[in-house]
Image (tube, rainbow, N blue to C red):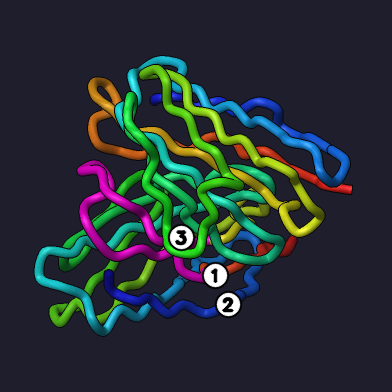
């Protein structure tokens, strides 16, 4: 099956710093990538949808200036949490969807655990 | 998108059959029902999808009554490794793109 990776798997940073999370589709071209966040014991919440080469579409209530998304190539999307604060600590998960062999199915990455001190 | 309601948690023992029911009273004619599984600190993975009646694969079965207002995921003879959160989603087929909106999910705990 299609494989999606995320890097880093865990990151700890100080309050006020920015953190970049990478999402890569390893064996297919992802025309669309999605970013989710998940707090402990809660469900996944869709943050934004990004299409290669265009601006991301953010869900209501998600600050686009705080969560910068770049989908510059068909295999890479990045999420940058700017000026991170402790309340941004969460599990960030990406998914990718594209053409053959992935078809229209979303394949999820393993997630990135962000802890802001 | 149709709202889904699932039990928050369920307990089971190894070797038992587990049935998790999801209510989706406002399901639309074109909506499919899809179930995902998520292990702790991992991304979700697709389990099964159906539109009506019964669907079975190597992992689970999905039962959908005629009115499609609910569905039941059946896991045969669970093992400890089936301990996970199970999400019921209603919307476009999982392999036709579009947003996936996750509800609260059911936390299944399988005990020895």
Residue at position x 36%, y 19% in the image: A74
Instruction: Point out the tag, 2 or 3, that comes first from the N-terminus.
Output: 2
Residue A50, x across and y down, in percent: 38, 37
Instruction: Point out the tag, 1 or 3, that comes first from the N-terminus.
Output: 3
Q: Check the image and report above or below for A117 versus B21.
A: above
Question: Between B111 and B6, which is closer to the camera in this rendering?
Answer: B6
Q: Which residues lie in the magenta part?
A: B86-104
Residue of label 3: B75
Residue B49, x across and y down, in percent: 28, 54
Residue at position x 47%, y 21% in the image: A76
Give the secondary structure at mark 3.
Answer: strand
Identify the chain of the residue marked 1, using the numbered disc in the image: B
Q: CA distance from mark 1 to mark 2?
A: 5 Å
Residue at position x 67%, y 53% in the image: B80
**Magenta span dominant secondary structure:** loop
**Marker disc for residue B44:** none
Give the secondary structure at mark 2.
Answer: loop
Q: Check the image and report above or below for A84 versus A2.
A: below
Q: Residues within 10 Å of mark 3 (few under 14, many from 20)?
A: some
- The image quarter in which residue A14 lies: top right
Residue of label 2: B8
Question: Between B35 and A99, which is closer to the camera in this rendering?
Answer: A99
Identify the chain of the residue marked 2, using the numbered disc in the image: B
Identity of the residue furthest to the front in this view: A65
Residue of label 1: B106
Residue A117, x across and y down, in percent: 89, 48
Q: Check the image and report above or below for A107 versus B55.
A: above
Identify the chain of the residue marked 3, using the numbered disc in the image: B
Residue A115, x across and y down, in percent: 81, 46
Give the secondary structure at mark 1.
Answer: strand
Task: Tell me whether circle 1 and circle 2 mark residues in contact (CB < 8 Å).
Answer: yes
């Amino acid at each position: 099956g299609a494989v999606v990776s995320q890097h880093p798997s865990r990151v700890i940073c100080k309050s006020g710093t920015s953190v970049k999370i990478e999402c890569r589709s390893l064996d297919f071209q992802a025309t669309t990538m999605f970013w989710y966040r998940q707090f402990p014991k809660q469900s996944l919440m869709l943050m934004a949808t990004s299409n290669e080469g265009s601006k991301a579409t953010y869900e209501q209530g998600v600050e686009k200036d705080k969560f910068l998304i770049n989908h510059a190539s068909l295999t890479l999307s990045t999420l940058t949490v700017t000026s991170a604060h402790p309340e941004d600590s969460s599990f960030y998960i990406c998914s990718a969807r594209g053409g053959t062999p992935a078809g229209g199915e979303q394949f999820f990455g393993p997630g990135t655990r962000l802890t802001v001190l | 998108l149709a709202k889904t309601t699932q039990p928050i948690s369920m307990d089971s023992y190894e070797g038992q059959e587990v049935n998790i029911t999801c209510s989706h009273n406002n399901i639309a004619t074109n909506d499919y029902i899809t179930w995902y599984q998520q292990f702790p600190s991992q991304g979700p993975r697709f389990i099964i999808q159906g539109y009506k009646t019964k669907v079975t694969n190597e992992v689970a079965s999905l039962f959908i009554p005629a009115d499609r207002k609910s569905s039941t995921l059946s896991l045969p003879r669970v093992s400890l490794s089936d301990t996970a959160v199970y999400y019921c989603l209603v919307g476009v087929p999982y392999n036709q793109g579009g947003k996936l909106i996750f509800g609260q999910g059911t936390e299944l705990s399988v005990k020895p």
